[in-house]
Image (tube, grey):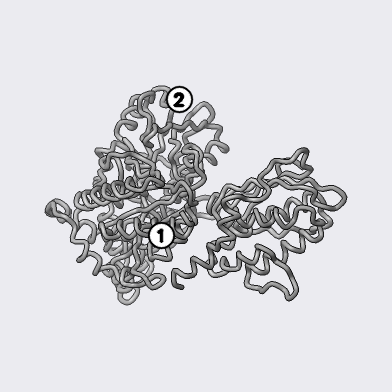
């Protein structure tokens, strides 16, 4: 791959999210708090969700990591504030499939997330893009185990509950 | 004893010539010349090491210490010859004080099990430093859990040197063992082993040195270091992956428990009980990696031909130049001692605006291989107040042009990020 692959990876929209991420503002009384780690590289991410009537009313994400993991977390916050838990879980599954090589389904509106398509060409960075989403899955499982079912443990990402 | 080391003259390394010996350095990465600056993770291998392994499998392959046939004798002789070379390489006085393991990590675990679990208990203390690689920390944590001994940690100063001003607060009559890296893999600091060993001696404690980043980069003399155990990984010193070294004082090895049980390490076995082979075989259960040992022998030949003093001088020069160039970049902050005399050939740094992983990815696209992450030293990262750093580590085949490539690619990263 030539260095032009870098332009695909570090698209302007990603850098924008990196510089000023969504979900940065703390929220009052979250009912789920989880913390995701990538033990391989040391990236960390704290996620607080305020869930009311099956919807994510607000969320706070505090990522400490690279541009890809921060931008992915920011896009997650941008897309899922106000979303139903089912939609949130569905988007997590779709995005994970995209990172593993799938294309966005026809008619879907990935929004800014589409900009992360370039990550596929950098296999060692895929886990960076997935950290926030694996953390989200764990957060939803903490809130409603039946909704999520068995969380598949990712070798590269470890999520711990801070307060259930 | 082979006098090759003492005959080596002080001479600058001929990097151009050395590069010819490393086939991997001829390959391209992303269309660019490979600039390999991840030597603290593992070094590349010269053709002579690759050939030695190939020759062993082509001509002498057999299991060691148990056959009466010609090949078994040759394999055993080759294996034991390397034990003598390793002993000479670190200036030990007894080849039977050299135990072959898989890597430094296994060497540390061996001592924690075979010595620690036999001799340590509640009320005893093991002193480490905040800079340790996880491999020289976690085995001692496990030991502490099992035996009730306590771990204490020597802190660092602002330049990443171990604080030796209040050693008597850490090293007391409770201290039974001091475990320290020879050189920090994340900071590059060459630790003052002798100063700390002196404090350990004063209270009758033993000294374990993790030499993973020491032995590859300069002369090692276990006698003058005044340590009791010294471990290193030959794969960071031109040798093959898969073989490790533990040197220990013979009397300690004699009184230690075995580590792993099995073939090779026994004297006599009945259904009920067994007795142990002599040192070092007591610690070498199972078939060893003879081919890797042979490759290790070839790597020591290569380094001793260059002269370890010359290797050290070369690295000091190149790291000095790297710090000079990095200091020109106002957005770069680097860690560890400023004085190249206190630092081995590596430099750990961060960009104020770009995460180390992003730096790693961008410079890789320019053919430059560096490490980005916590360097298996998470407590140290915490101590420095960072999550990760980027690390460039140099070796005998690197020169100023490689440093220049690194600097250029760091500037490219700024462009990619619109800075």
Gap in angstroms between the C-alphas marked 2 and 1:
53 Å
Do badges 2 and 1 share one subunit? Answer: yes
Is A4 located above or below residue B83 in the figure? below
**A157 sits left or right of B122 in the view:** right
- Residue B57 % position (x, y): 35, 73
Where in the figure is residue B86, as x and y percent of width and height? 28, 53
**Mark 2 vs mark 1: in front:** 1
Please give the name of the residue rendered at 54% of the width and 53% of the height, measured from the top-left corner. Answer: A66
Dot 2 and dot 1 residues touching (CB under 8 Å): no
Query: Tag 1's secondary structure?
Result: helix
At label 1, counting other C-alpha atoms closer than 10 Å, the crowd grade (few under 14, some 14-19, many 20 or more) is some
Residue nearer the viewer, A100 or B130: A100
| Rendering coords of residue B281 (x, y %) | 38, 53
> Please, which chain is the residue tagged with disc 2 on?
B
Q: Residues within 10 Å of mark 2 (few under 14, many from 20)?
A: some
Residue B199 visible: yes
Residue B81 seen in render: no
Judge whether A100 appears above or below B321 on screen: below
Q: Secondary structure at mark 2?
A: loop
Question: Hey, which quadrant is residue A93 in on the image?
Answer: bottom right
Residue drawn 79% across and 51% down? Answer: A56
The residue carrying mark 1 is B412
**Seen in the image, is A63 located left or right of residue A26?**
left
Which chain is disc 1 placed on? B
- Judging by the rendered image, the residue that carries numbered circle 2 is B174
Where is residue B343, by image quadrant?
top left
Instruction: Answer above or below: position of A101 versus B155.
Output: below
In this picture, residue B62 sits left or right of residue A101 = left
Residue drawn at point x = 45 percent, y = 45 percent: B133
């Amino acid at each position: 791959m030539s260095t032009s692959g870098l332009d695909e990876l570090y698209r302007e929209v990603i850098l924008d999210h990196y510089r000023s991420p969504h979900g940065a503002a703390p929220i009052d009384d979250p009912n789920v708090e989880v913390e995701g780690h990538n033990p391989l590289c040391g990236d960390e991410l704290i996620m607080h969700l305020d869930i009311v009537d099956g919807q994510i009313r607000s969320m706070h994400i505090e990522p400490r990591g690279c541009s890809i993991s921060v931008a992915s977390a920011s896009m997650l916050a941008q897309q899922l504030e106000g979303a139903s838990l089912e939609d949130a879980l569905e988007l997590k599954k779709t995005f994970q499939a995209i990172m593993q090589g799938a294309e966005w389904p026809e008619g879907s509106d990935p929004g800014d997330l589409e900009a992360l398509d370039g990550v596929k060409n950098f296999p060692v960075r895929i886990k960076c893009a997935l950290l926030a989403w694996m953390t989200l899955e764990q957060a939803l499982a903490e809130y409603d185990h039946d909704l999520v079912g068995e969380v598949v443990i990712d070798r590269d990402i470890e999520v711990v509950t801070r307060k259930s | 004893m082979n006098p090759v080391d003492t005959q080596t003259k002080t001479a600058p390394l001929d990097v151009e010539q050395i590069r010819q010996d490393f086939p991997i350095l001829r390959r391209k990465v992303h269309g660019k010349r490979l600039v390999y600056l991840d030597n603290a993770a593992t070094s590349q291998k010269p053709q002579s090491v690759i050939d030695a392994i190939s020759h062993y499998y082509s001509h002498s392959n057999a299991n060691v210490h148990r056959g009466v046939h010609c090949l078994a004798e040759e394999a055993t002789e080759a294996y034991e010859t390397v034990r003598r070379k390793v002993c000479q390489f670190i200036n030990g006085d007894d080849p039977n004080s050299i135990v072959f393991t898989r890597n430094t990590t296994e060497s540390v675990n061996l001592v924690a099990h075979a010595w620690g679990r036999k001799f340590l208990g509640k009320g005893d203390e093991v002193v480490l430093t905040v800079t340790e690689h996880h491999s020289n920390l976690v085995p001692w944590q496990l030991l502490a859990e099992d035996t009730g001994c306590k771990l204490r940690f020597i802190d660092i100063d602002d330049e990443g040197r171990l604080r030796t001003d209040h050693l008597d607060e850490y090293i007391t009559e409770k201290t039974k063992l001091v475990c320290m890296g020879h050189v920090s893999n994340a900071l590059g600091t060459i630790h003052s082993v002798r100063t700390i060993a002196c404090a350990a001696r004063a209270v009758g404690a033993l000294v374990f040195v993790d030499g993973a980043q020491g032995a590859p980069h300069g002369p090692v003399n276990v006698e003058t270091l005044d340590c009791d155990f010294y471990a290193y990984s030959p794969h960071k010193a031109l040798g093959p992956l898969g073989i490790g070294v533990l040197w220990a004082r013979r009397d300690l090895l004699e009184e230690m428990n075995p580590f792993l049980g099995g073939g090779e390490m026994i004297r006599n076995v009945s259904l009920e009980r067994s007795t142990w082979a002599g040192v070092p075989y007591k610690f070498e259960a199972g078939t060893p990696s003879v081919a890797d040992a042979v490759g290790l022998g070839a790597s020591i030949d290569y380094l001793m031909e260059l002269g370890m003093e010359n290797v050290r001088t070369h690295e000091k020069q190149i790291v000095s130049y790297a710090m000079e160039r990095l200091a020109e970049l106002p957005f770069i902050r680097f860690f560890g001692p400023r004085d190249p005399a206190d630092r081995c050939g590596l430099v750990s740094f961060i960009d104020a605006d770009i995460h180390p992983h992003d730096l790693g990815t961008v410079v890789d696209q320019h053919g430059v291989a560096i490490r980005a992450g916590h360097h298996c030293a998470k407590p140290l990262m915490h101590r420095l107040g960072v999550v990760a750093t980027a690390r460039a580590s140099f070796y005998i085949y690197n020169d100023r042009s490689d440093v220049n490539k690194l600097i250029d690619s760091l500037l490219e990263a700024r462009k990619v990020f619109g800075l």
